[in-house]
Image: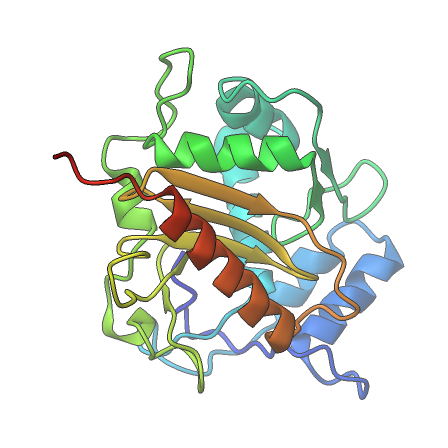
């Protein structure tokens, strides 16, 4: 959950075909059932568990497979029962599959309407209590999952040049002057997809983008500045 398993993984999709992310793409293109888990089962250990943060799309795929194994449900059906329905989504979401009728790819490939991504963020903001009153997460899970709780995932420790921290599959937003982002966290997808959750300010922001490449540092800085400006503008005036 904290991307600290210690299993070897290179997230860069390099052209020479040596990175695990590239091999994951090749497994997807093969459309062969079991190809993704087959790749993950062959990965060696690079570090002891819990010592080094290393972002891995493969680990997210593995977590999805574990949910399927534990529940006996297809991941999409389980999500529909536990999240999509209780959150009151207005439209169906779509999962990318490993193969025809095969496993959902939990690390990426979920498509949904922008407002439904916002509803997902709102469900998390409400600590897993849906608008119907049905609770889908244990009390306190939001604050546990959205914040760093170990040295390798601490603010500024993840990778060179990044001030962020990491929770349980959420990027913890570093505190900023004026307290605008205190306690905030975000889901950051490829090509500029964001779900920003700020429990302190009671704000959820969902963004869908179409960047020319999966990661764009300049565009990300602009999005962060926009989010910060929006939260600042929405801050309630102190009671007189």
Image point (55%, 58%), residue name: 188
Image point (78%, 66%), residue name: 25
Q: Quadrant of residue 122?
A: top left
Q: Quadrant of residue 28?
A: bottom right
Locate residue 29 relative to residue 209 in the image: left or right: right
Locate residue 129 relative to residue 143 in the image: left or right: right
Image point (76%, 44%), residue name: 96
Quadrant containing the N terminus is bottom left
Q: Is residue 72 above or below residue 132?
A: below
- Please state which of residues 236 and 168 is positioned toward the viewer in this rendering: 236
Q: Position of residue 47 (x, y in %)?
A: 39, 82
Q: Is residue 39 above or below residue 117?
A: below
Q: Position of residue 2 (x, y in %)?
A: 38, 61
Quadrant containing the C terminus is top left
Q: Is residue 144 above or below residue 126?
A: below
Q: Position of residue 125 (x, y in %)?
A: 37, 36
Image point (36%, 12%), residue name: 133
- Please state which of residues 143 and 61 is positioned toward the viewer in this rendering: 143
Query: In this rendering, does residue 161 appear at all?
Result: yes
């Amino acid at each position: 959950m904290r991307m600290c398993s210690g299993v070897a993984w290179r997230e860069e999709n390099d052209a020479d075909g040596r990175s695990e992310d590239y091999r994951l793409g090749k497994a997807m293109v093969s459309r062969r059932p079991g190809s993704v888990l087959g790749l993950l089962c062959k990965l060696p250990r690079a570090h002891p568990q819990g010592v080094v943060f290393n972002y891995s799309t493969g680990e997210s795929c593995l977590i999805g497979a574990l949910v399927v194994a534990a529940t006996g449900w297809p991941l999409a059906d389980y999500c529909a029962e536990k999240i999509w329905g209780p959150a009151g989504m207005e439209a169906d979401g779509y999962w990318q599959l490993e193969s025809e009728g095969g496993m959902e790819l939990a690390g990426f490939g979920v498509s949904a309407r922008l407002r439904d991504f916002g509803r997902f963020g709102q469900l998390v903001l409400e600590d897993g209590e849906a608008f119907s009153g049905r609770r889908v997460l244990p009390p306190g899970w939001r604050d546990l999952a959205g914040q760093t709780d170990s040295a390798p995932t601490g603010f500024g420790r993840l990778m060179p040049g990044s001030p962020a921290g990491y929770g349980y599959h959420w990027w913890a937003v570093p505190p900023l002057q004026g307290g605008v982002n205190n306690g905030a966290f975000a889901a950051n997808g490829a090509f500029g997809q964001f779900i920003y959750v700020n429990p302190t300010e009671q704000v959820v922001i969902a963004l869908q983008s179409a960047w020319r490449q999966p990661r764009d540092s300049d565009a990300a800085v602009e999005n962060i500045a926009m989010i910060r400006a929006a939260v600042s503008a929405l801050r309630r005036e102190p009671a007189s």
